[in-house]
Amino acid sequence: MWAYAEDTEWASAARRCGPDGLIGRAEETGTLREELARHRLVTVTGAAGIGKSALAAVAVGGEGGDGAEGAPAWARVIYVRCPGGGGPVAVGALAARVSEAVLGPRAAATGAGASGRPTAVPDARGARTKARPALTDLVAALRGTAGRRSVLLLLDDADAVRTECAGLVQRLLMDVPGVRMLVTCRQALGLGEERVLRLAPLAPDAAVELFLTRARDAAPGFRAEGTESAAVARICRVLEGVPLAVELAASQLAAESSARALADRLEQGQCWLAAPGPALRRHRSLRSAVGAAYLLCERPERAVWSRSSVFRGAFTEPTAAYLCAGAGLAPHQVPTCLARLAAAGVLETLDEPGGLRPPRYRMTRAARDFGAERLHAAGEFEVAVERHVLHHRRLAEVAEHLWHAGDQRQAARLVRDNAAELTALVEYASRPQAPAAQVTAALATVADLWFWWTVHDHGEEGRAHLARLLPRATADDHLTARARWLAAWLHAPGDPATARTLLGQVWPVAVLAGDDALIGWVAHVQGVVAWERGDARTAAECFRQAADTVPAFAPGGPAPAVSLAALAVAQAPTAPGAAGRSARRALSSPGVRDDAWATALARYARAYTDHHQGHTARAWHRAHRTLATLDARVPLPSPLDSPDIPSVRASLRRLLTDIEAVRTPRATVPAPRTDTPMPSRTSSRM
């Protein structure tokens, strides 16, 4: 038997379920039913729109009434829609709502409980409000209701009255042995006997299934075929599998020209999603669902929420403290605010608290879009972007220093952990209204991370960043020349004509500045271009010039040992003796032992030249030993202790295959990988 407060919203949540229950929630439904059968207090938590109320409806049999298959048998299920949703509420409002559901509207209105004596409940200011049934009458009523079977009291959406809810739940569990409690809230109540089930977003396949089911209701003729199927998957990925967002997006399909158009619009923002159908006000738009959590936050938490919305990926507490502090918010307050936002489902915690690494946070997409709206409304967006750009500019400087200091594993990890923020930095600097200082900082950042684009196979991404920033660089200075040189290197494997044009712009600047390092790096890229067109002799001359010109330990580009390794590869077919000397020279270059990439290239070149000289066994052992070191999962006390050098690893494997097949090895020189079609002369790159 069900008992409802005078509220049709629970029935609305139940109607969202299909005949087989919630899509993609079969495991969670079974888990919740098991927890309710074993424990007296279960709380379902999760972010806004994740489906807490709907899951509770299915688990206790709400979609089909009392006694649904697999649901526990209750003497009575009492549903109470907790007050609030639009901000804080008066003290005692929840107790009054529960009393109304248990005792009936008439008893609650007259304030007469089981004793017949009216009582009063204090409001938020401590004053006495109109008469309400005493808590003792509520306890007596629940005791009378419970017989051999338990009574289930379901408190839905308790966020606005979480503190009062915790006290009421604890009192009822102590005084009414036959009552069990199911609470839906964005965060747990914090009681000792509480069992918490935290809902995660839907899996990709389940999110697509939910979208298609709702889309057929909104647009009966819709068919997800071909490009539309890929667009539906992209929509669900952008919405991060949040059921409410997926349902609202599906309802918009009839108003859009295609699923692809809807996906493009959602990538720009998603708080605009709305539909008139849901009875719950907070479910009628994604902005309302997320905004309900915002209204319950204290002022410092709101500031951290909105200012952190400029982050696109994961961020740490120190980074957030630097960006969010100010205007009444002290840096030491930021970690506490982050923890509270994470508990409320606004942030995701990516690392285990108390682990070896400091915790990192990531803001959900809907929360980030809402926070960005608030940040713009407060007039703080440009200040937050400026701090974001400055911080990640310094991060790139640190990463480059680590690379040249020999800690290449840490340098690559630092860039990888902040890859999304580096992309955001370029996007912020590419805005038409972005100041010149931000463009300069972004260009310097991309240039400093040359090793990430070239060594770690992110050439396409680096080339795209430079294509956006270089047209906005007005000054023909040294920084612009470095960026053009990097762009030339990234273009060299697939677009040598563009590479030659860029090098022609870099050369006079490098010569006039007397920058030997840049002059040598230009020669190295010229060697790559010559190698691409099959001119090994010219390539060798260019690599030799680069090796002789670039100073040892010069930051900002490849070490001389890299050019020497390329020289050895270019010499091997025609002058194997000279190639062997070049490879040995590369291995003995100053500082090469602190450069994992240069060392791996030099050892590859040594093995390659050994094979050309007929020393097959020696070549196989050199290549195998180097590859084993690169593939080692446990850090070794070796200069080759690098997180990933995929191009060198691929070259070594090809060399081993050629040696074992007793055929002429396919040569590679250090060049960024690219998805652009290559000339037939070239195989894959280092």
Image: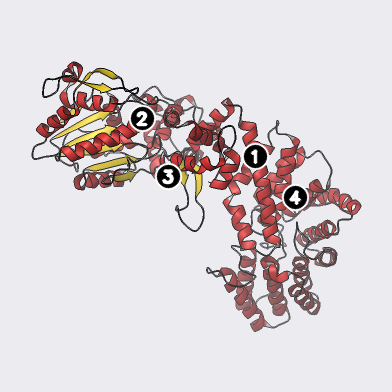
Name the secondary structure under disc 4.
Answer: helix
Tell me residue 467's x, y (percent): 72, 43
Kindly identify which numbered label has been placed on residue 387.
1
Q: CA distance from mark 1 to mark 3?
A: 35 Å
- Badge 4 or badge 3: first in the primary sequence: 3
For label 2, the crowd category at 10 Å Cα-Cα, with few meaning under 14, some 14 to 19 and many 20 or more, is many
Q: Looking at the rendering, in which quadrant would you find the C terminus?
A: bottom right
Q: Amino acid at mark 1?
A: Arg
- The scheme the figure's colours follow is secondary structure
Instruction: Using the rendered view, name the quadrant where residue 157 is placed.
Output: top left
- Identified by mark 3, the residue type is Pro
Cα–Cα gap, marks 3 and 2: 31 Å
Contact (Cβ within 8 Å) of mark 4 with mark 1: no
Which element carries disc 1, helix, strand or loop?
Answer: helix
Q: In the image, what residue type sits under mark 2?
A: Ala
Of residue 662 and residue 211, the one placed in the foreground of this image is 211
Q: Secondary structure at mark 3?
A: helix
**Of marks 1 and 3, which one's residue comes earlier in the chain?**
3
Mark 3 or 2, nearer chain start: 2
Q: Which badge, 2 or 1, is on the more N-terminal residue?
A: 2
Q: Position of residue 374 (x, y in %)?
A: 54, 28
Q: Amino acid at mark 4?
A: Ala
- In the picture, residue 75 is in which quadrant? top left
Residue assigned mark 3: 204
Closer-to-camera residue (442/582)? 442
Residue that numbered label 2 is attached to: 160
